[in-house]
Amino acid sequence: MSRQTALADLEQEIAAPGGGPDRLRLVGTPFVPEVRLYLAEDAILWWARMEAAAGRSLPPPYWASVWAGGQALARHLLDHPELAAGRRVLDLGAGSGLVAIAAALAGADQVIANDIDPYAVAAVTVNARANRVRVTADGADLLDGVTGADLLVAGDALYDAGLAARVLPYLRRCAAHGVQVLVGDPDRGHLPPDGLELVASYPVPTTEPSVDSPVRRVQVLRPR
Ligand SMILES: C[S@@+](CC[C@H](N)C(=O)[O-])C[C@H]1O[C@@H](n2cnc3c(N)ncnc32)[C@H](O)[C@@H]1O
């Protein structure tokens, strides 16, 4: 799947008439109302319909939902704009691009939103456009290198053990090279026992089926 094909698919989805829980709609982000995103009311239904139309499997559309970790981090950047203002920012595992867009709204000089899913790269493009900000969408796997950004933000990028095992060393390596690193995480069970310290904590509204409370406590953390 090329990023051009993914972008054409999303643009067609957005422009198509009609509605329903399996469609993309431009909606306000509950904890970050400054940002509007194209999201699916039911991302699983959207995924099933797109796979049926494509006749093959597609990556899970993580970009079609708003994640608690990203919401907390985006809120933190907008409430503390000095963190991003005038700086080069990398949003790792950007999904919809929520955190990248918040960084741009906070006055970042340059924002790169990185995600290996071509549909996420496309979602970043349409969402940045909808919020009238400049964000560069990047689909490379960066985890074996070191970023040249000043600030590295990662919202809900520790959602599975295999990915956490690559992301955590990347964050530490970047921090050791002088990059400021901020992680937004609702503790999905892959936080290291030490090495990260608490910066802030937010009660984030969530509709995740696995959570029985309408609010999830999310930490913003940085390497020690
Ligand atoms: C749980 S989503 C979080 C999205 C967004 N940051 C938020 O908080 O709303 C995690 C994202 O990480 C992306 N991802 C997985 N492996 C990756 C990798 N090696 N490099 C960059 N992104 C990756 C997935 O495609 C997914 O979009």
Image (tube, rainbow, N blue to C red):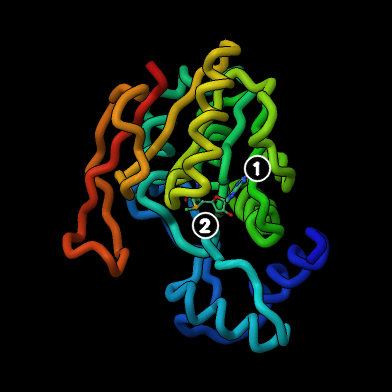
Q: Does the residue labelled 1 lie within 8 Å of ligand 1?
A: yes
What residue appears at the point 28 percent right and 25 percent down from the top-left corner? 198
Q: Up-down: is 105 above or below 208?
A: above
Indicate the amino acid at tag 1: Asn
- Where 45 sits versus 197, above or below? below
Left or right of 47, for residue 57: right
Residue 146 to residue 13: above or below = above
Residue assigned mark 2: 37
Q: Can residue 199 be seen in this view?
A: no
Dot 2 falls on a residue whose secondary structure is strand
Mark 1: give few (<14), some (14-19) or many (20+) Cα within 10 Å: many
* Image quadrant occupied by the C terminus: top left
Pointer 2 residue Cβ closer than 8 Å to ligand 1: no
Q: Do the residues labelled 1 and 2 touch (CB within 8 Å)?
A: no
What's under tag 2, amino acid-wise? Leu
Among all residues in the image, which is located at the extreme left? 213
Determine which residue is flagged by label 1: 114
Report how far apart the C-alphas of labels 1 and 2 lie in the structure: 17 Å
The answer to whether residue 208 is seen in the rendering is yes
In the image, which disc is placed on residue 87?
Answer: none
Rendered location of residue 153, percent (x, y): 51, 32
Q: What residue appears at the point 49 percent right and 54 percent down from the top-left corner?
A: 36
Q: Is residue 65 above or below residue 13?
A: above
Q: Where is residue 152 in the image (x, y as percent from the top left)?
A: 55, 27
Q: Which residue is drawn at 28% across and 28% down?
A: 200
The residue at 75%/63% (across/down) is 7
